[in-house]
Amino acid sequence: MAYDLIVIGGGPAGYVAAIRAAQLGKKVACVEADRAGGTCLNWGCIPTKALLKNAELYQTLTKKASEFGLKFDNLTYDWSAVIGRSRKVSDKLAGGIEFLFKKNKVDYVRGFGSIEGQGKVGVTAADGTKSVLEGTNIMIATGAKSRPLPPLPFNGTSVIGSKEAMVLAKQPESMIIIGAGAIGAEFAYVYNAFGTKVTLVEMLPTILPVEDTEVGETVEKSFIKQGIRCLTNTKITATADKGTHVEVTVDGPKEKGTLSAEVVLVAIGVLPVLPGGQQPALTDRGWIQVGDRYETSIPGVYAIGDITGPPLLAHTASFEAIQAVDGLFVDGHKPRKVTNFPGCTYCHPQVASVGKTERALKEEGIEYVVGKIPFVAIGKAIAAGEPDGFAKLLYGKKHGELLGAHIVGDNATELIAEMGLALDQELTIDDIHTTIHAHPTMSEVIHEATLAAEGHAIHF
């Protein structure tokens, strides 16, 4: 049987590409080595959010219950049930993707995919059985995996990556997290909320270093208040896995010397996961190079999602999937590349951003105005007991167009969608100003920050 499209990888890029192509009436197969949904659904975005919700609820009940007039005696938790809930959520959603494959008549093939030649994909099943699929077009969507720290290889118990951090059978008493990007920050919040002594080590000046500097500084202050030790501007000079514990030697302004913890979580980034067989041209960091239509250097082979390099985000991967498939099968469609995209971190306080940071605007010499409003000025935030954080909007000084939006605080990851639309549609300060935001809602922080950029905020 010849397919119109064979997709290698079933994550947010792969399964979306497969379903979209099937919707267009094409014969499609999706090859996945693990399970439908890929890393995001099974070992990333979804299960971590389940753990974060557990952590947030537990922290609220243990640290803030009295604010709401609530009292608890001997409140406890079951670590295995906490982990189990996150796995059930992933299993349910993975099953949902498998249902969508059936609904859209996508052939779901379990196994490791490799490109065996023009229009041929070899599949090696878990039991070693091999088969070959044939198709006109092949799309690589194999994603990425945790990057190890060279002198400290993963062992699944005392030195772990994000995957193992989601399923540790025993909660560690202490943990050192190397890398304070989104993954490191989220796990720092989860484990600290349940009582693990967490030390977060980051070589750059602030945690969440890709975010606006002020945002990173705000989250760091909040983390320190919560009991997370944050060592920024800190290099790691030596490591040693002692079996019962791991030692990490650091050199920074806050700490010089050797730290010890039961578990070390390495969160310093990811590596590409390439399919087997023929390989298209790669960048110097191992990502697949693609052209304007997501084509690789091999005729008839395309690539989308994390395997093509940053931004390494599930929602950008799904965007690329639609663009690439429509470019293949819809007459006259010119695929778009990712330009503006939201970045979200789901620790507490939450962080979300889209567009330029203030740091980038200064470096590029772009004139801008800032509108910044703290959540404490928003009635809904006070009522919800979530007054920490702020919204910071950056508008062009000459034309008033939105250049960037940065939110740290409750529901930031939900609030950013409006700013993404505004950036994509080139909306101006006047457009946002004249848009009525319902009261009382957290979204009023967007309206107030826009008024602040004009110099006449009402509630602050």
Image (cartoon, grey):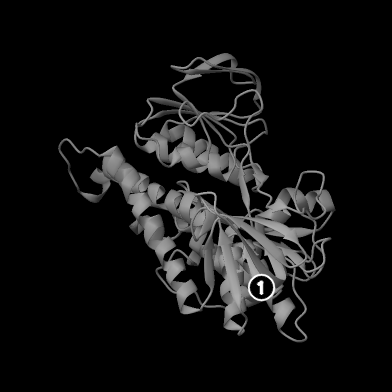
Q: Position of residue 213 (x, y in %)?
A: 65, 44
**In the rendered structure, which amino acid carries the disc numbered 1?**
Leu
**Could you tell me if residue 403 is visible in this image?**
no
Residue at 64% x, 77% y is: 431
Outermost left residue: 73
Q: Position of residue 64 (x, y in %)?
A: 30, 43
Q: Position of residue 420 (x, y in %)?
A: 62, 67
Query: In this rendering, is residue 45 above or below 205?
Result: below
> Foreground residue, 188 or 328?
328
Residue at 77% x, 43% y is: 285
Label 1: element kind: strand
Residue to which mark 1 is pinned: 5
**Could you tell me if residue 446 is visible in this image?**
yes
> Seen in the image, is 214 located left or right of residue 282?
left
> Seen in the image, is 124 located left or right of residue 335?
left
Dot 1 surroundings within 10 Å: few (below 14), some, or many (20 or more)? Answer: many
Q: Quadrant of residue 334?
A: bottom right
Query: In this rendering, is residue 114 above or below 427?
Result: above
Q: In the rendered image, which quarter contains the N terminus?
A: bottom right
Q: Position of residue 323 (x, y in %)?
A: 69, 73
